Structures are given as structure tokens and as C-alpha cells.
Image (spheres, rainbow, N blue to C red):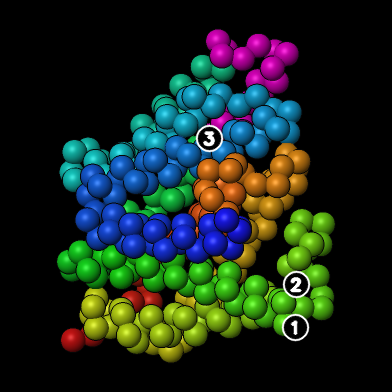
């Protein structure tokens, strides 16, 4: 089976399953996000080990998986998220390095990478507050709002690839990702804006009763495209530093989970930050 065939089969199966989990929401979505965060953290620590570091992987994977659970509990009113509670968890992780890593194991690097891996992988949790955004009424509207930045990122990937293949002449960051071009980056941004306009017109308005002005569509599309492309480049930089081609081999034809969601990890927080300022209700 060719790599392209494996990619197509995986995408055909994974896309509707993901939409279904988002639509169901609640603990079902929380379970998916916890699994993705834990796997992404594992891949971060795997790459770090390939680069010669020795992070506290077990603790980091567990804490990354707990982030969606904590957010879910917060939205369900079980408890309120607080900065002091997060600080105590952080200090506990710092203290644990006394017993988990010897001086020869570079404890400073170990704990720094562990904290980074938890926070980096945990960015996928922003799907949850998008699904339950204050402007959203109903599961269909919540699913549409989540898919808005997700499809925008796919538009960036598709546009950057197509425009790069057709018109690419000037390298974007050759030391980090030799195949990416300035023309591809511009094309990715253009396709993202068009994707956002189409999604707003034919999905967000009729199914979520929400919309954006033309200026809002352009701003949102450009912001998501820039964030997505930076996220892709950042993970490429990490892989080059670690000397690995893919974050893992878990996803057939795609590499690892991080290779699939690296752009989303940057785009989702940006989307949540600005979407509330841009959305307008429509009848």
C-alpha cells in the first residue's frame, strides 16, 4: 500500500470520527483530547530523548492527559480553575526532579522539557472551550465553531502545498524546512481566507447562526494561517534539533500525532482568543 493510499484511508476514517467526538462533547470529547494530549506529550519526550535529553516522561504524559479533564471539570462546575492551584502543581513537578533525576541526568534540562511538553501538547485542549463557547447554542453550533479553525488550517496546508509546487521560487526558512517557500506561504494564507469565507457563508451562518464581517473573515483567516505555518515550522525545528524525520510512526502515512496537529496547537489558542471579538449573531 502506497503512502498516499494510507494517508487517504486514514483521513477518510479519522475526519468523521473526530467530528463525531466533537459533536458528542462532554466526557467523550474530553477522553479524546486527553488521549491526543498524552500521545503528543509522549512524542515530544521521544524526540527529546533522541536529542540526548532525559525528560520525566511518565509525569509529563499523565499531566498532559489531565489538562482536558481539568478543563471539563471546570466547565461542569466541579471546581474553578485557579492560578495558585496551577502554581502548586508546577512546584510539585519541580520538586520531584530531586528524586527522579540525578545531577548527571541534567535535571535542569529534564524539568524544562517536561514542563514544555505538558504545555505544548495541552494546547489541543482549546478545542473544548471552542465547543462550549458562550456564543454557541447547541451541539451543531459548537461543532461548527470548532471546525472553523480546523478547516482553516487544512486550507493553509493545502494552499501552501499547491502554490509552493506551482509557483515556489523563494525559500521561506531553508534551514528549518527546505521545501517551504514564500510563495507557498502566501498561497496558503489566500486559500485560508477563501476557506473561511465559504465556511462562514455556508456552515457558520445556517447551522450556528453566527457570522463574521468580510473584514473579520480576512483577519481571522490571516491570523490562523500565520499561526498554523509558524506551528508547522516550530515542530520542524524541534525534529531537526532531535535528528528525527517524524515525531513517531503512529499514524499511517502521516508520521506521528504531532506531525498532524502541530499547526492546530498554534491555531486553536489564537482562534479562541480572537473569535469572540469577531463573531456576530445572525437570525
| Proximity of marks 3 and 2: CB atoms separated by less than 8 Å | no
Residue located 30% across and 70% down the image: 144
Between 97 and 17, which is closer to the camera in this rendering? 17
Residue 114 among those drawn in magenta: yes
Q: Is residue 166 above or below residue 125?
A: below
Q: CA distance from mark 3 to mark 2?
A: 30 Å
Q: CA distance from mark 3 to mark 1?
A: 37 Å
| Proximity of marks 3 and 1: CB atoms separated by less than 8 Å | no
Between 193 and 162, which is closer to the camera in this rendering? 162
Tell me the chief SS of the magenta region.
helix
Where is residue 76, by image quadrant?
Answer: top left
Residue located 55% across and 10% down the image: 99
Can residue 186 be spotted in the picture? no
Q: Residues within 10 Å of mark 3 (few under 14, many from 20)?
A: many
Q: Residues within 10 Å of mark 2 (few under 14, many from 20)?
A: many
User: Which span of residues is magenta-colored?
Assistant: 98-117
Image quarter (top left, top right, bottom left or bottom right) of the C terminus: bottom left
Name the spot of residue 72 as percent of width and height, x first.
26, 45
SS at mark 3 in the image: helix
Which residue is situated farthest in the front direction here?
1
Instruction: Read off the residue under disc 2.
Output: 181
Q: Is residue 187 above or below residue 34?
A: below
Residue 115 among those drawn in magenta: yes
Instruction: Read off the residue under disc 1.
Output: 167
Between 135 and 150, which is closer to the camera in this rendering? 150
Tell me the tag on residue 42. Answer: 3
Mark 1 or 2, nearer chain start: 1
Closer to the observer: label 1 or label 2? 1
Name the spot of residue 166 as percent of width and height, x first.
72, 82
Mark 3 or 1, nearer chain start: 3
Q: Is residue 225 above or below residue 20?
A: below
Amino acid at each position: 500500500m502506497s503512502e498516499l493510499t494510507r494517508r487517504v484511508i486514514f483521513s477518510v476514517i479519522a475526519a468523521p470520527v473526530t467530528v463525531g467526538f466533537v459533536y458528542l462533547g462532554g466526557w467523550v470529547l474530553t477522553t479524546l483530547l486527553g488521549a491526543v494530549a498524552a500521545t503528543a506529550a509522549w512524542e515530544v519526550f521521544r524526540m527529546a530523548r533522541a536529542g540526548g535529553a532525559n525528560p520525566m516522561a511518565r509525569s509529563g504524559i499523565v499531566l498532559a492527559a489531565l489538562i482536558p479533564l481539568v478543563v471539563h471539570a471546570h466547565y461542569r462546575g466541579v471546581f474553578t480553575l485557579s492560578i495558585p492551584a496551577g502554581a502548586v502543581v508546577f512546584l510539585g513537578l519541580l520538586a520531584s526532579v530531586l528524586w527522579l533525576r540525578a545531577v548527571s541526568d541534567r535535571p535542569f534540562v529534564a524539568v524544562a522539557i517536561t514542563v514544555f511538553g505538558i504545555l505544548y501538547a495541552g494546547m489541543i485542549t482549546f478545542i473544548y472551550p471552542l465547543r462550549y463557547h458562550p456564543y454557541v447554542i447547541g451541539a451543531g453550533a459548537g461543532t461548527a465553531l470548532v471546525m472553523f479553525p480546523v478547516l482553516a488550517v487544512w486550507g493553509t496546508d493545502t494552499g501552501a502545498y499547491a502554490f509552493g509546487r506551482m509557483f515556489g521560487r523563494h525559500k521561506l526558512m531553508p534551514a528549518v524546512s527546505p521545501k517551504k517557500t514564500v510563495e507557498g506561504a502566501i498561497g496558503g494564507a489566500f486559500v485560508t481566507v477563501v476557506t473561511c469565507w465559504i465556511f462562514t457563508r455556508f456552515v457558520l451562518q445556517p447551522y450556528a447562526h453566527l457570522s463574521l464581517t468580510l473584514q473579520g473573515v480576512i483577519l481571522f483567516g490571516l491570523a490562523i494561517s500565520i499561526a498554523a505555518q509558524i506551528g508547522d515550522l516550530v515542530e520542524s525545528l524541534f525534529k531537526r534539533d532531535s535528528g528525527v524525520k517524524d515525531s513517531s510512526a503512529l499514524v499511517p502515512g502521516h508520521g506521528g500525532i504531532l506531525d498532524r496537529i502541530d499547526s492546530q496547537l498554534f491555531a486553536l489558542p489564537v482562534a479562541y482568543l480572537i473569535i469572540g471579538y469577531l463573531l456576530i449573531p445572525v437570525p
